[in-house]
Amino acid sequence: MQFLDKLERKFGKFAIPNLMLYIIFGQGIVFFATLINPILLNNFSFSWAHILQGQVWRLITFIFIPTSLEPMWFLLMVIIYYSVGSNLERILGTFNFNFYYFISIICTIIICAIFGIQGNIGTYINTSLWLSLATFMPEMSFYLYFIIPLKAKYLVYIYLLFMLWDVIGSSNKIATLLQIIASLAGYIIFFVIPLIRGNKFKIWQHSNNKQKSKSRTKSDKVDKVIKVAFHKCTVCGKTELDDEDLDFRYCSTCNKEYCIDHLKFHDH
């Protein structure tokens, strides 16, 4: 996508590498803080009314609310989120993954502000990552509880079941459905739109091509370093690259370097 390429050229330097690691680290802090004082959790949740009153940190802190406060489930979700997020960043590239995540946050905030949705609104954003990875790597395996192998493509069915359950059980089904769609903003931009245009793997190929280009550039630089000549005759211009057996010496009179053929016979 051209507009993403333009954005990356302008703002790529601001992209956060290993974004999912920072999010998980933040969730860990909130998790342990909540164990100490459960009331603190309310200060991190999204609330548009409180944001308008000056509690602007709620615009981002909801992302750090864990999906579950049960230690076993928390650990399991952390492992899954990190695995999914890091793989997506590797596939899409750091900037594209940042854009994917933050555009989903922005769209979710807008919908929740309009419909007055409060609480942990970041869960849908994180679970949408399952759908993205399953689209790119359907045969990739996860080990549920470190024992049961589960292919990524089955995460799609789990995701759809969770979303359907939430919509059915919601008192405001339209608002919940729109919130889910908003959380999929990144998925729509990176997967649905290219799929409609017939460019399903365009982003992946673009990312890989950039990596290959960097590898070639690095290789070329190495080759250039290896081929640098350290000796050059002042008269004939020959270097050790022209003849490996050619010797070079400095003239003590003119302090210039010559090959052995011109060392004794040159003008000062």
Image (cartoon, rainbow, N blue to C red):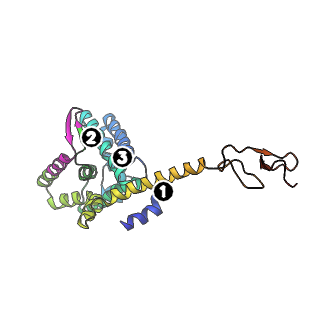
Region rendered in magenta: 143-162
Q: Nearer the viewer, residue 47 or 193?
A: 193
Kind of residue at badge 2:
Met
Q: Is residue 264 magenta?
A: no
At x 48%, y 56%, the residue is 13
Label 1 residue SS: helix
Q: In the picture, residue 116 is in which quadrant?
A: bottom left
Q: Is residue 149 magenta?
A: yes
Looking at the image, is mark 2 or mark 3 earlier in the sequence?
3
Query: Would you name the residue on which mark 2 appears?
Result: 77
Q: Are dots 2 and 3 in contact, CB under 8 Å?
A: no
Query: Would you name the residue on which mark 3 appears?
Result: 20
Q: Which mark is residue 13?
A: 1
Residue 30 seen anywhere in this rendered image of the structure: yes
At x 78%, y 44%, the residue is 249
Can you name the residue that lies furthest to the left here? 168
